[in-house]
Image (tube, rainbow, N blue to C red):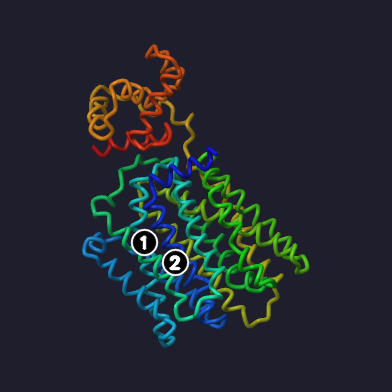
Amino acid sequence: MRYFQIFFNIFKKHYRIIIILGSTFGSMITFPVFGPVLLHMVGLKYVLLMSSFSLLFLTIGYLIKPFYMEIKSNILLLLSFVSAFLLGISFFLPLWMQFLAIALFSFSAGRIIVFWSKLMFKEVSINDRAKVISMGLFFAYGFLYLTNVIISFIPKPITPLFSVLLILIAAVLLKKDSTDNMIPMPAVLDRTVPIPWILFSLIFLIYITAGITYAEVYPGRTSYPSLDRFYNVLPFVLAVNVAGYISDTWGRKYSLFIGISLLGISFSFFLMESSIISYFLIQSIIEIAWAFLDLYVLVVIADIAERLNRREYYTFGLAFFSSGTLFGAILCTITRNIGINQTVYALLAHLPLFIAVAFLGRIPETLKKQEEMKGFLTPSDEMMDNIFILLKDRFSLTPREMEVTFLILQGLSNVQISNKLYISENTVKYHLKNIFHKSGITNRNELRSYVINLIKQD
């Protein structure tokens, strides 16, 4: 019950960020990136080529430096509406116009995520980041699941409308924030974190596997289309919030190790004779693996970008994500006419993972545990005055609640606070409950991070 309550509170606090991420990713995976809408509209003949084209322009969208006039002057909103309109009527357009619509749509999605990342850095603490992103992925893949279920009942001309609606929701919600609100809080520069090119290389290698899997392995293994429609991404949807909880509670690298291990295990099942049992085993293990890996990548590149105070590294990392998938799809395009069987494709898909294992020891754990944070901040008198004014203005905390807050900032436990203030431990818990309720914050680490950022911003 506590697990669901945690996610409910996270959604109440960050619903806009979650919906923007879920709608944007959902629009891409339901249509232009190997989506069921694309397959329903154009058939297998053009799916691989159009998906590769989409990934190319999505990557370009990630890489271009954000210009806030895109938001302030409604340029991004206009681009999103134009691309959504073209994609919405793409069934009636000639082939070259369909490619143009996909290019504009994918580029718009990339730009939306660039600006979404600014909001994410500003509003989401590191201790809730995985849960927030996992909920965004939950909605994205939930949309994909629903699309898979209903797509065969929808006339082809109107199938793009669902994906179009998602991107418009994301663009409109993003527009609600002014340019100033998108400037992220400053972060502490942590020079112990290595330059992330090793991480980017790991991401690229992992997502070569994704490109090969979605381009060739999945289509070749779909022996039960009626069953696949209802089960395909269901394990991902069920697993991704668990991955978020594990990443925020135990550490980020758990998601990486679980994901890569499961992908490696899944390879052995590709050697099995095709049957319902092998289908369930492969589909379940692979989808759960990608839930953990997708979550890991989206979270850890944010952690490292923030700790290096180089926020642009986040979208650079996403570009390696999409370009790795693109490279895997291109490999399939090149080898498609050679007559490679599914077992060889499965081996080819997993080969980058074996190479990626060599990088694992070089990837840092980016989640700071509570014990490591103790004593991180001991406020000076001047700093305490600043905190007093900021908290009084923002949350209307009582003097006793502010005393408790100051002691939390110094890393004291509930027992230590009760001894210092000569109150019972239950009274400390009561004050903590009031502090969290008034501030909308859910735990001590988040409170510490929030106040530290307030001080730096001030």
Residue picked out by circle 1: 170
- Label 2 crowd (10 A; few <14 / some 14-19 / many >=20): many
- Looking at the image, residue 290 sits to the left or right of residue 270; the answer is left
Q: What mark, if any, has residue 27 been given in the picture?
A: 2
Counting from the top left corner in percent of width and height, residue 435 is at: 36, 29
199 in relation to 4, above or below: below
Counting from the top left corner in percent of width and height, residue 307 is at: 39, 43
* Quadrant position of residue 431: top left
- Label 1 crowd (10 A; few <14 / some 14-19 / many >=20): many
Q: Amino acid at mark 2?
A: Ser
- Looking at the image, residue 411 sits to the left or right of residue 64; the answer is right
Residue at (42, 47) in percent of width and height: 11
Q: Where is the C terminus found, in terms of image quarters?
A: top left
Q: Are marks 1 and 2 in contact (CB under 8 Å)?
A: yes
Q: Is residue 198 visible?
A: no
Q: Amino acid at mark 1?
A: Ala
224 in relation to 414, above or below: below
